Image (cartoon, rainbow, N blue to C red):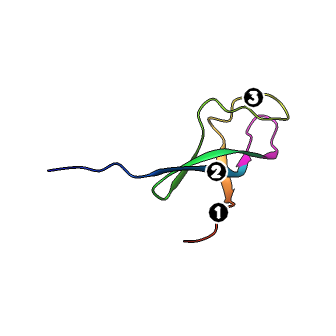
Amino acid sequence: MLVSMPVRKEGRSWVYCPICTHTVEAPVIWVGKKAMVKPGEKCPRCKALLDAGRVLRDRAAAA
């Protein structure tokens, strides 16, 4: 039985920074329908890691 991994797409999206409480644009990875902030990315305003940030809006069009 062969198991295939879902395709990982990368793009930019709006992410909520829990430290400075602002919405910033950051790189996002889509795995299936789930969107996650790219590991190690920092907030451009406060320089905190966005690993715990939530993806708020997708900039990708519906397919």
- What is the magenta range? 15-24
Q: Where is residue 52 in the image (x, y as percent from the top left)?
A: 62, 37
The amino acid pointed to by label 2 is Gly
How far apart marks 1 and 3 lie (CA) works out to 25 Å
Contact between marks 2 and 1 (CB within 8 A): the answer is yes
The amino acid pointed to by label 1 is Ala
Q: Earlier in the sequence, mark 2 or mark 3?
A: 2
The residue shown at (82%, 45%) is 22
Q: Position of residue 15 (x, y in %)?
A: 71, 48
Is residue 16 in the magenta section? yes
Q: Where is mark 3, residue-wise? A: 48
Contact between marks 1 and 3 (CB within 8 A): the answer is no
User: Quarter of the image holding residue 38?
Assistant: top right
Q: Where is mark 1, residue-wise? A: 60
Is residue 22 in the magenta section? yes
Q: Where is residue 35 in the image (x, y as percent from the top left)?
A: 56, 51
For label 1, the SS is loop
Q: Nearer the viewer, residue 54 or 59?
A: 59
Q: Where is mark 2, residue-wise? A: 11
